[in-house]
Image (spheres, grey):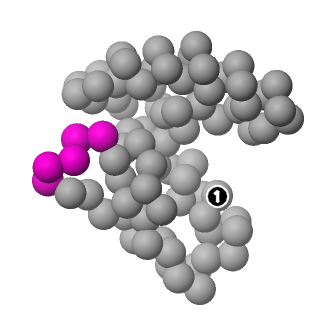
């Protein structure tokens, strides 16, 4: 799975290279569209901690998070049962 790299705790993202942009998109789009369709309302910066927790809750025992040097925006998750 690929998703935005960052913490679910805003105070841990002060140096995120595109954090302000991601939070803006999250506020103006994600946090309005998702709840409108009975979604969780997690937002674009729902965080790596939440991603790992939800992947494990879905039944995957092993979750590894990987990063690519050239990709400043994403984290990559490999999950197995």
Q: Residue furthest left?
A: 69
Whether 50 is drawn above or below 31: the answer is below
Question: Residue at (57%, 16%) from the top-left corner?
Answer: 27
Q: Residue furthest right?
A: 38
Q: Residue 8: where, in percent of width, then height?
A: 50, 37
Q: Residue at x 60, y 64 (%)?
A: 55
* Magenta residues, start to end: 69-73
Residue 68 is drawn in which quadrant?
bottom left
Residue extending farthest to the bottom is 81
x, y percent for residue 19 = 34, 24
Check residue 49 for magenta coloring.
Answer: no
Residue 69 location, x and y as percent? 14, 53
The question of residue 70 being in magenta is answered with: yes
Q: Main secondary structure of the magenta part?
A: loop
Relative to 52, is 70 above or below?
above
Q: Which residue position holds label 1?
A: 54
> In the figure, 75 relative to 60: above or below?
above
Tell me the element at label 1: helix
Image-based side of 11 in relation to 54, left or right? left
Q: Badge 1 local density, few (<14 within 10 Å), some, or many (20+)?
A: few
């Amino acid at each position: 799975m690929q998703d935005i790299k960052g913490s679910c705790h805003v105070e841990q993202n002060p140096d995120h290279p595109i954090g302000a942009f991601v939070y803006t998109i999250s506020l103006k789009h994600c946090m309005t569209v998702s709840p409108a369709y009975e979604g969780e309302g997690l937002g674009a910066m729902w965080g790596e901690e939440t991603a790992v927790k939800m992947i494990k809750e879905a039944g995957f025992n092993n979750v590894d998070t990987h990063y690519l040097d050239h990709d400043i925006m994403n984290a990559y998750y490999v999950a197995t049962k």
